[in-house]
Amino acid sequence: MPWDDAAREAFLRVQFAAQDRHFRTSYPSASNDLIVQGDEVLGRLHVDRAREAWLVIEIALFPAYQGKGIGTRLLTRVPSEAAAVGRPVRLYVERSMF
């Protein structure tokens, strides 16, 4: 979109607020964790552990950190933690159209 920085920022804030409201309404017990390395934020991870089967709602990494095995490590760790408490894990994958 040929938007200036202010318009792009406003659009992203509205989109984030809508997604955040949806997650909080649909998954009120879910964690909303930042993925960090040192002082640097790499992305975020939402997991609802309050269900019979744990649900990985979202994992998002900034492009600079994609393809480095970070997501793989997280998506290996969550099922291990769930198995330790006798829970299965569910994951929905949405194919990006971008």
Image (spheres, helix red, strand yellow):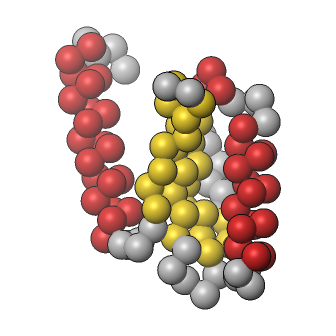
- Residue 16 shows in this picture: yes
For residue 69, what is the image quadrant?
top right
Determine the residue positioned at 26% across, 48% down: 17
- Residue 42 shows in this picture: no
Determine the residue positioned at 33% across, 54% down: 20
For residue 55, what is the image quadrant?
bottom right
Determine the residue positioned at 38% across, 63% down: 23
**9, above or below 24, in the image:** above
- Tell whether 64 sits left or right of 7: right
Residue 58 or 3: which is nearer the viewer? 58
**80, above or below 63, in the image:** below
Residue 30 or 3: which is nearer the viewer? 30
Residue 93 or 34: which is nearer the viewer? 34
Instruction: Residue 70 in the image: state x and y as whole percent.
Output: 72, 38
Quarter occupied by the C terminus: top right
- Marks counted in the figure total 0
**47, above or below 75, in the image:** below
- Tell whether 98 sits left or right of 15: right
For residue 84, what is the image quadrant?
bottom right
Determine the residue positioned at 28% across, 59% down: 21
Instruction: Residue 62 in the image: state x and y as whole percent.
Output: 56, 29
Instruction: Residue 37 in the image: state x and y as whole percent.
Output: 59, 30
Quarter occupied by the N terminus: top left
**45, above or below 29, in the image:** above
- Tell whether 88 sits left or right of 64: right
**From this viewpoint, which residue is outermost toward the front?**
38
